[in-house]
Image: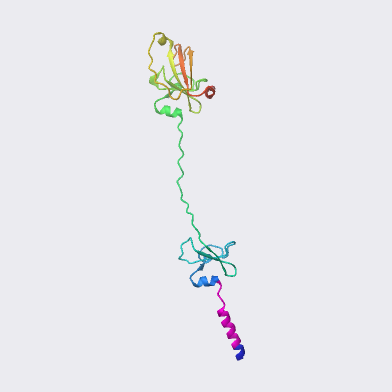
Amino acid sequence: MTMIMRACSIGFLAILAMPLAASAQSERTGYKKVSSLVNFPPFFSGTGALYIRPKTPPDGPFSAFDPRGRLSSTIYMRARYMHTRRPKRMAMHISDRRKSERIGYKKVSSLVNFPPFFPGIGVLYVQPEKLPNGPYRAFDRRGRLSSTIYMLPIEDLENRKQFDLEGLAGKGDHVTFYFNSGHPGLDKPHYHIHIWHVSKKGEEQVAK
């Protein structure tokens, strides 16, 4: 019996003398299993069982152990903070037509009996006090400036009247000069000085 007790004692002492698994050693120094602190898997594939001291900053160090409790790696996690930015306000494009309306231009069709859209000219605008000579501004159906127009009565030209013209609403591309026998707003025979701000091909925008 004494021999058996001695054998047991020796075996027990041998067990005590066995080195503790690294995970157990870490637990003795204050490490806790991450899965016991937050919603994290007890064993994470490719990493192992993850341990950390609760008071350690969230970026680590973490200790990772294999299934047998052996230390496999030390991990640091750098948190990437996402800064929420307010979406940029989209720049609102104000059409050429709207810009002209803001400085007093009115649709000619609202002032005299004239078509809202005239093929070859477009949508015609003028400042009422500048009737009948202009300048008129012509726009395509999308509100883009296509031309500046002056209307000069032949009678005034024959009488050598001086015209003080304001210039152009935009960069000129080419000019068309043609006769008109008269229309609502200027029923006398006159000439149109049609200064285009678009190319010859661009005239298609107001063709119909």
Q: Residue at x 38, y 20 (%)?
A: 129
The extreme top residue here reads 158
Q: Which residue is drawn at 44% across and 29% down?
A: 98
The extreme bottom residue here reads 2
Q: Give the quarter of the image for residue 171.
A: top left
Residue 51's x, y, as percent? 52, 66
**Front one among 135 and 2:** 2
- Look at the image and tell me in which quarter the C terminus lies: top right
Answer left or right for 6 relative to 60.
Answer: right
In magenta stretch: residue 17: yes
What is the basis of the colouring in this image?
rainbow
Is the residue 201 above or below the residue 75 in the image?
above
Is the residue 39 above or below the residue 86 in the image?
below
Answer left or right for 69 relative to 124.
Answer: right
Q: Which residue is drawn at 51% across and 71% down?
A: 27
Which secondary structure dominates the residues rendered in magenta?
helix
Is the residue 176 above or below the residue 37 in the image?
above
Q: Residue at x 42, y 29 (%)?
A: 99
Residue 52's x, y, as percent? 50, 66
Q: Give the quarter of the image for residue 107.
A: top left
Query: What's drawn in magenta, residue-wise?
Result: 6-21
In magenta stretch: residue 35: no
Answer left or right for 139 relative to 21.
Answer: left
Q: Give the quarter of the image for residue 153.
A: top left
Answer left or right for 47 relative to 106.
Answer: right
In this rendering, the count of numbered labels is 0
- Look at the image and tell me in which quarter the N terminus lies: bottom right
Residue 6's x, y, as percent? 59, 88
Residue 20's x, y, as percent? 55, 74
